[in-house]
Image (tube, coloured by chain):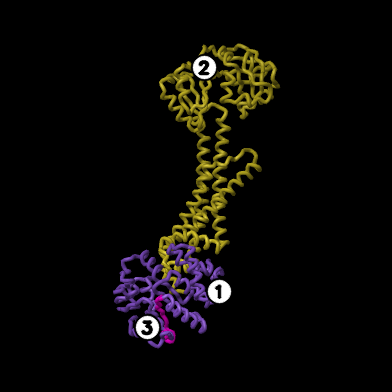
Amino acid sequence: MLSLRIAARFLRRNPVQSGLIAAGIAVGIGVQVFLGSLITSLQQNLVDETVGSSPQVTVVAAAEGDPVDLTPTMWDALSRDDRVTTAVPVRRFSAIYRRKAESVPLQVVGGDLGALDTIYDISKRVVAGRARLSGDAVIVGKDFAKANGLAPGDAATLVLPDGRVAGRTVTAVADFGAAAANETLAFVPAGFAGDVLDLGDGQYTAVEMQVSDVFQSTAVADALRADPAFAGTKVTEWQSQNRDLLTALQSQSSSSYTIQAFVLIAVALGIASTLAISAVQKTRQIGILKAMGMHDSRAGRIFLWQAALLGVTGAAVGVGVGLALIVLFSRLASTFTITPQWSFVAVSFAVGVLVALLSSLIPSRRTSRLDPIEVIQSG
Amino acid sequence: MAEHLLVADGLGKTYGDVVKTTALSDVTFSVERGEFASVIGQSGSGKSTLLNLIGLLDTPTTGQVLVDGRETAALGRRGRARLRNELLGFVFQFHHLLPEFSVVENVLMPGLIAGRDARRSRVRAEEVLALLGLEGLEDKNANELSGGQKQRVAIGRALLNEPALVLADEPTGNLDTANTARVYELFRKVNAELGTGFLIVTHDRSVAQQTDRILEISDGRLVQDVRNTYAAPAP
């Protein structure tokens, strides 16, 4: 470990120069950690906002207007697929809320509260009243309730698709997280929706699902389409219906990668040039060590060790700087929280050390090729 | 019969590919263990080239260098580096100490390069420093010493691995008369007490006359190789 010892001594002899290189690496890795975690958290947040509380894969009948007959083989297929976290059969229809001369359109979803909660999270989103879906209950969005002066316990009159009129009682008002849903979405018991649509037991308008990894929705949909149990149905998923969002996310990732790559290149060039200068400064020492019998590769390793020491120190400080930036950002901009991506932090650290090592290749090679006579003769 | 410590066999060195400059041609001589010899010549005569060749720092264009009967041409850079470390000690006109290390660490360096036990090397380094009259300076930085002291530390470094031969290239070129005399006294003392051989390159005839054998180089050729019985220390 003589090379390491000499490397450490060389670094200590020029503390300002060593500090500047380590600071360069630290800034680069700090930006990496912060930017990487920011972009990933931003995307997760965006995806969560978009599809977190809505169905990601939906099965409907192939012919529009027909019901889906939910058979035991379909249930088996859905429960066998580990990627499907929840599958909820629903009965959807359109209705009109009538108040005096005004008519307001509503998208009504019929189902069991427990099952609906696994996708829409209704019970936790209630802002007034108590979540209950039985008898003549209806749960409405907060914007709809506000516009129409409705509160829990109030009566609401709905005009159904076939023209019938039904009186319901508001049991709860909820915040569904999006303006469109808060204005038009309403939930009713599964039995009532079955009566409205004239559906028998086991008949639904759709089976709505969520998957463990939202970006797996295409694969899950493909698997269901290929399954004979789902013959006569149509499977849709969120990614094919949100192309613009996906393009935006991908563009965001690409620009983030580009920035990160150029930051790393700048860091690498900085380390390489400073180490090259250091190698020139230490030519005399290297020459004399070689005259005393240090062989070429061992002399070359001195600069590899220097780079490793600078890389590890710089990258460790950089991770600290990145995490500090994340905490600071989360405190100052409270719209959403950045979660440190630990795997990304580990990769950034490794990349920092690797870039430092790669940057030392030129000075290392130069050092190992140095002929001691050049130094001794020139004094 | 014991092998010669070092044999220069028809050594020649030519520099340049297009315009060829011959620095040394057909130099043949041998050095025995414990010899106290000098190489003398004018500046530019080729004596430093000769020292680089027999010090295994450079390779000859013609001829060969044998150390302990071994041909060195076939050893490669790594093999020659090891042989330098084990058998040879170098003292240059400039002390070439490492400013990043203390006095004792500088002296220890050849032992560390050889991978010797650090504690035993440290004891040896302290002995060498004591022999050179540098006690108490062990932990000082090499830069804090006077010119004469620095050169003595460099001599200590050359002696650490108990080399068979110390090659000294104008070792007192930068020293005043008092320090010059002191260095030669030390060389003699080490030669007498440890049996270390010395080959001192100099342009100064008065320095050469203090050695037991004088090899004279002129225009890249060995022109004289004489015994100098007057220089032997008084018994």
Tell me which chain appears yellow. Answer: A
Q: Residue type at mark 2: give it.
A: Tyr
| The residue stretch that appears in magenta | B195-210
Q: Secondary structure at mark 1?
A: loop
Q: Which residue is mark 3?
A: B213
Name the chain letter of the residue that bears numbered label 1: B
Q: Which residue is mark 1?
A: B145
Is residue B205 magenta-colored? yes
Q: Quadrant of the C terminus of chain B?
A: bottom left
Q: Which residue is mark 2?
A: A204
Is residue B137 magenta-colored? no
Eyeballing the image, is B68 above or below B212? above
A27 or A285: which is nearer to us? A285
Tell me which chain appears purple. Answer: B
Q: Secondary structure at mark 3?
A: strand
Examine the rendering and report whether any part of residue B17 can be seen: no
Q: Crowding near pointer 3: few (<14 within 10 Å), some, many (20+)?
A: many
Q: Crowding near pointer 2: few (<14 within 10 Å), some, many (20+)?
A: many
Instruction: Say whether residue B87 is left or right of residue A16.
Output: left
Examine the rendering and report whether any part of residue B94 can be seen: yes
Q: Residue type at mark 3: give it.
A: Arg
Circles 3 and 1 on the same chain: yes
Eyeballing the image, is A205 above or below A335? above
Name the chain letter of the residue that bears numbered label 3: B
Eyeballing the image, is A321 above or below A136? below
